[in-house]
């Protein structure tokens, strides 16, 4: 907009988490949440199963969860339920359930970080 001053801040993702691939969501607390395919605690996939992270409006980055393949790997986007809980899916990880999966089949996960209900 004309006459308004805009500022931007880059938050580097190095080490763990790294390689974000899905859009950030702004949660009920005003902070931004997202997922990465890099980082995490994993011996497969080159040591990178992914993470869930938070970025505050002041730019502070916090890793909230490190995937370890047993609970998922290679994440997708997050959504926030009206109760404050995050939900998401992974492309890999979990247990081998069906014979037609070449390896593990992925997971559906929930993550509660203590956020209140969405109003």
Image (tube, rainbow, N blue to C red):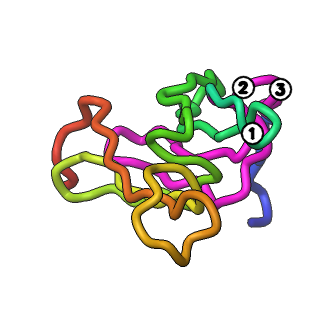
Front in this rendered view, residue 36 or 90: 90
* Residue 9 pos. (x, y %): 78, 35
Rendered image quadrant of residue 114: top left
**Label 3 with label 2: CB-CB less than 8 Å:** no
Precedes in sequence: disc 1 or disc 2: 2
Is residue 98 highlighted in magenta?
no
Is residue 21 highlighted in magenta?
yes
Precedes in sequence: disc 3 or disc 1: 3
Residue marked by disc 1: 38
Q: Secondary structure at mark 3?
A: loop
Picture disc at residue 14: 3
Q: Residues within 10 Å of mark 1 (few under 14, many from 20)?
A: many
**Label 1 with label 2: CB-CB less than 8 Å:** yes
Magenta stretch in the rendered image: 11-40
Q: Is residue 84 above or below residue 48?
A: below
* Residue 51 pos. (x, y %): 59, 37
């Amino acid at each position: 907009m004309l006459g308004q001053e805009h500022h931007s801040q880059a938050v580097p993702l190095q080490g763990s988490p790294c390689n974000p691939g899905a859009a950030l969501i702004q949660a009920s607390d005003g902070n931004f949440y997202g997922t990465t395919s890099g980082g995490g605690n994993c011996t497969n996939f080159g040591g990178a199963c992914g993470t869930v992270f938070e970025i505050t409006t002041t730019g502070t980055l916090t890793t909230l969860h490190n995937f370890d393949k047993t609970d998922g790997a290679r994440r997708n986007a997050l959504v926030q339920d009206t109760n404050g809980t995050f939900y998401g899916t992974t492309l890999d990880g979990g247990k081998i359930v069906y014979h037609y999966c070449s390896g593990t089949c992925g997971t559906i996960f929930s993550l509660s970080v203590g956020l209140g209900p969405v109003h």
